[in-house]
Image (tube, rainbow, N blue to C red):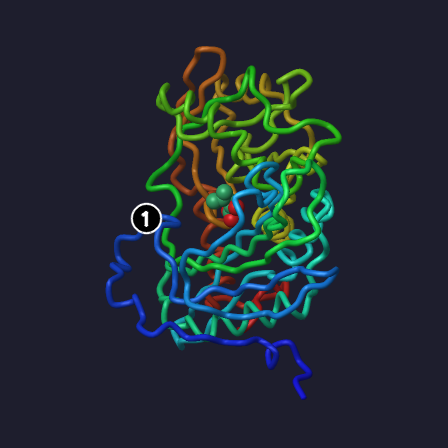
Amino acid sequence: MKNTVSQQIEITKASESKIGQVDFENLNFGKIFTDHMFVCDYVDGEWKAPKIIPYGPMTLDPSARVFHYGQAVFEGMKAYKDDNGDTFLFRPDENFKRINKSAERLAIPEFPEEYFFDGLNTLLKLDEEWIKSGYGNSLYIRPFVIATQASVSASEADEYRFMIICSPAQSYYSGDVSVLVAEKFSRSANGGFGYAKAAGNYAGQFYPTKLAKEQGYQQVIWTDSNSHEYVEEAGTMNLFFRVNDTLLTAPVSDRILDGVTRKSLIAIAEKEGISVDVRPIKVSEIVEAANNGSLKEIFGAGTAAVVSPVKAFGYKGEHYEIEKQENSYASHFKKALMDIQYNKAEDTFGWRYKV
Ligand code: COI
């Protein structure tokens, strides 16, 4: 009899690995995927038949609700390999909790913990060779859920698919980024689902970000939808502002993603005695700090982005350059975080999870 979920996972191995065709030194984020994927369907009121199959296209009915109403949520996580060849995840329990928090808001049924971890562990062991050791190399893991029920009726589906796909990754941004502060468009609103990793939250950013790119900025700093006076997040990452030696970051809310990297940096800073002020931040105070020289750094924090320095921002037609700091907080936090992720430092927080 099959009792644990991993024993129940039906595995069909790829007939041939694609790994030999991959240039691991020159990876574009999210373009190449490993040999296998985890799939589990929700049918007749339960998640069932977990399986791992070769990575590849799949067939869905054109009326599947995900195509029409965007009923979909996802997560972003990474696996890291240390110099001994051991593989680790970073705070995967946070991703598990968050995908279900996002799912609840999108009326998607909760995914069971045992299925999540057994699916992930089995998949990572199978595609283990795709995780390269060395600082900066990782395997980006994308768990997601889509509404598969065939029907364009505008209500929550009663059939879903949970999947995990994995992509070898290096850095998300190729250099320091420039960001444009939003004055007109909004990413989320009070009572909305900005806190969720819902597909639509990202699609809604593409058009304003495309306009920002035409002005030479790679990302938008979202501001509150009521007044556009307060900074929120950058869509692919939460934001930190260093004013003199204090770090400022906006509090999470129903409009802002509760980023795992964000809260890890806050914990590291607090442990090291670096002053962190988690409070609503006015755009005007960042502009004033840029003008009077007290704005030392801006950086983003996220799973894909890790810790990404911002070199300039645009606001109301003005462009503000941020001078590079010699001993930047961004590089300090990036190293402190990566040392834990790559098993190079003691994990006093208990964040590392051995696969
Ligand atoms: C992540 O950092 O994992 C994200 O989800 C950002 C992404 C849209 C690439």
Q: Position of residue 48 (x, y in %)?
A: 66, 68
Residue 217, picture quadrant:
top left
In the image, 256 versus 17, the foreground residue is 17
Q: Position of residue 3 (x, y in %)?
A: 69, 83
In this view, which residue lies farthest toward the bottom? 1
Along the viewing direction, whichever of 230 and 288 lies nearer the viewer? 230
- Residue under the point 49% across and 21% down: 290
Residue 302 in view, yes or no: no
Image vertical order of residue 176 relative to residue 32, above or below: above
Q: Residue at horizontal 47%, vertical 30%?
A: 206
Callout 1: SS:
loop
Residue 256 position within the rendered picture, expressed as x and y whole percent measured from the top left: 65, 36
Query: Furthest residue to the top?
Result: 317
Location of residue 95 with respect to 16 vertically, above or below: above
Residue at the disc numbered 1: 28
Q: Residue at x 59, y 23 (%)?
A: 186
